[in-house]
Amino acid sequence: MAGGYVGKILEVDLTTKTIKKTPLNTKDAEMFIGGRGLGAKLLWDRTKPGGHYLDPDTPICYMSGPVNGLPAPGAARLTIVTRSASTFPKSNSKHTGIVHTNCGGRWTPELKFAGYDAVIVTGASASPVGIAIENDDVKIVPAGKYWGMGTYDLQDALDADFGRRYQTVYIGPAGENLVRYANILTEIHHACGRGGSGAVMGSKKLKFITVRGTNGLSIDNMRTWQAANKKAWDEVMSSGGYNEWKRLGTGMVVTGSSDWGSEAVYNFKEGTYVYADDISTEKALRNLWVGNHACFMCPLACLHRGVVRKGRFSGMTHDGPEYEGVMMGANCGVRDLAGWQANIAAADDYGLCYISMGNVIGFVMECFEKGVITAADLDGISLKWGDVDAMLEIQKKVAYGTGCGKLLGQNLRALVAAWGKGCGDYAMETKGQGFAAWNVRALKGFETTYATANRGADHLEGVDISIQNTRIMNDALGICLFQQLCGLTPETMKDLLNATTGYRLGMDDYWKTAERLFTLERSFNVREGFSRDDDTIPPRAFKEALSVGAAKGAILNYKDFNQLLDKYYKDRGWDNKGIPTKARLSELGLDFV
Amino acid sequence: MIDPKKMGKKEESDLKEKITNPTRRDFVKGMAIGAGALALSPLLRSRAEAIDYDNFAIKQALRGEKVGAGRVSHDYRLCVGCRVCEMTCAYYNQKEINPFKSRIKIYTYQPEVWVGVVCTQCGDRPCMNACPVEPDKDGRRALYEDPKGKGLAVDRDRCIQCGQCVGACAAQRNSSLRMTEENYPDGCTLCGGDPQCVKKCPQAALSILPRTTDGKYAAKPADIMAAEAIETLYGGPKTIVDNWK
């Protein structure tokens, strides 16, 4: 076995309660690397066209990358690949696209120390279960007593029952109730958020997977590894932004992004939030935070542990806020820092993706303001801009699927279909997936990556193909993209990969691999009926210009957008319907597609 | 912060010269070593960052002076739970990429704090006193203090693998002394006087402090330390979610 990989995949079928350990296909591993890439290949192999995310035989793949668990900076990312609960083609709303969603924490390294590169769960159990892994010992355990628990209580219960050295991924009540933007969390706040993977886990009645490992990992070439690793740590820790990342994390751009006009404000109506100072990270730093939080092997420690010290939420402890929390803040017109924090904490406790939840709440607030709906549609809740208590009530209804929560827990398309009256114009989604907190009008290039991202509107894909490719390799290797933002170069990552696994990839091969992974994901979506019609940006970005701030007047137009899309397809080697060409597929080694 | 990449050769060597110059060395030597290092550490740390990511680089000069009876101290206020120390310890001491083999362990508690369980080299050495092996001519039992690094050392030829040292640590201190898979005690050797975990900690949460006479405060069990950490950082265990439900 090449270094880096452990060489074993754990397959659990919850219908028949069988556990299988299969060897890793080394050829696939070399072609698709790991994490997001290998996950896409496994999903491709194990699904038939036209499947649904709630089908019991839909596999959910918990993937690690070859560098996970090794002492490289930020080598902690868990990538979950499955069918998305919130990515749909326009041509057929019964089909679902691919989702890759990742989070940090300490779970993936522990999985590799236990001796597995990936866990693939298929089937559905009749009663709630969990999976407990300790090295070779894998058990399906009943989880009736944990079912219904929020993540705060669940983490405590698992710590008490299994021990503090176990690492666990789990779902909250939202996942159990199949909310289509439920997430999978570890350590209460690291969330695999986008794409509703929590609903897939919930449909299998799988509450948690807990892991403990005591085996070592190997590296193919220790000498080159040490040189590459030294370089990697040097690049990160000597970069100019290192101290800022450590002090403020992603939240440092809450006010910055507002100033550039690129924030999500009032359901993306504006890009500049006039009250941004009220929810600024400096304020959080001084009023909320007690210390940092890092994922496995991360020197940046960009997360912050906070506690609310006064007011009605006093005593509440939670991580953050981070930049994407703006979806619950500026996007919903919130000005109350503690109330914002409470909403973020509630979302994590319920197991809701706060990006999508914030998007839905912002949309509902706008519908309420415009008279599309009344309080009667929301079980008597007046959902006005910035009302943190109403937001908390809505979240609870969504998580438990009660009253109006049943509908709100679907997605924006379902809301538009139910309410009509032109509200589709300001439903901010691509491929059904809600927008994250970057406003495309003020950011050149974001419109193409938001439109073409395979899991739907995706905030992590940068501004062009090269950044999309960089990020996909991060997810494949298992290295956090923030290391990249803080100085780690793709060249060093390639060296790390080569040293770990014994591959001899040059930079060209590295980028070609990225193309291959991205095209495979695209091909999966094409197989499910996605095409150019789904690579869209919502009408609001074309119809309404921003009206305040530095980006005042910024607006997109269809002609430019279509030209950009044409160019994008051409650069990717796809036809102008957005379908990868046969020639391109065989060039990339994807002949099986 | 000085960017090492932009720093000229001359400046760099000047800086190194400054750090390792004999005057300071003598000065540090002259002070009660632990306290001196502690007082200087903010100053030293900023310099260290300027040269290398290695926060402990500067303290190499101190180590050259034989830090007497030191110990690794874990600061729960600065720890971020990255486990770099565990990986470093396991790789340096056992040549394995496996934090399970580490002699320092980081435990997570909720609300989130990390408590490091690491040997505090207690002055009264309950582990060594528990060793039933007859002392040799140097007064060493099977578990003894390494005269060079001042850490724990095991004489595997004489060890009878009874586990009484481990039991004493668990009963009286923080359980940092454990058995290896081959059933020998596995205690902190201070890496021969150059603790790698301290050197690599990116958050400077680990440091070298002077040994205390009995180590009873520093070597409290993880659960008790965690309660204290939660009190310090969050003002006590909180009813985290009650106020929105």
Image: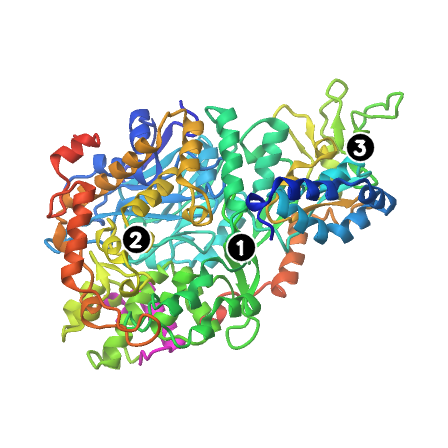
Q: Position of residue A399 (x, y in %)?
A: 33, 63
Q: Is residue A71 visible?
A: no
Q: Secondary structure at mark 1?
A: helix
Q: Viewed as shown, does residue B32 lie left or right of A557?
A: right
In the rendered image, which residue does mark 3 sit on? B128
Q: Position of residue B235 (x, y in %)?
A: 63, 66
Tell me how far mark 1 sits from mark 2, CA to CA: 25 Å
In the rendered image, which residue does mark 1 sit on? A246
- Magenta run includes residue B207: no
Is disc 1 on the same chain as disc 3?
Answer: no
Name the residue rendered at 45%, 76% in the picture: A336
Is disc 2 on the same chain as disc 3?
Answer: no
Q: Quadrant of the C terminus of chain A?
A: top left
Residue at the top extreme of this rendering: B157
Q: Viewed as shown, does residue B185 lie left or right of A77?
A: right
Q: Nearer the viewer, residue A564 or A538?
A: A564
Look at the image and give the residue range highlighted in magenta: A382-407
Main SS class of the magenta portion in the image: helix
Which amino acid, mark 3?
Answer: Met
Q: Secondary structure at mark 3?
A: helix
Examine the rendered structure and indicate whether residue A429 appears above or below residue A528: below
Is disc 2 on the same chain as disc 1?
Answer: yes
Q: Nearer the viewer, residue A520 or A378?
A: A520
Q: How is the image coloured?
A: rainbow
Q: Position of residue A252 (x, y in %)?
A: 47, 62
Which amino acid, mark 2?
Answer: Val
Label 2 marks a residue whose chain is: A
In the rendered image, which residue does mark 2 sit on? A463
Label 3 marks a residue whose chain is: B
- Magenta run includes residue A399: yes
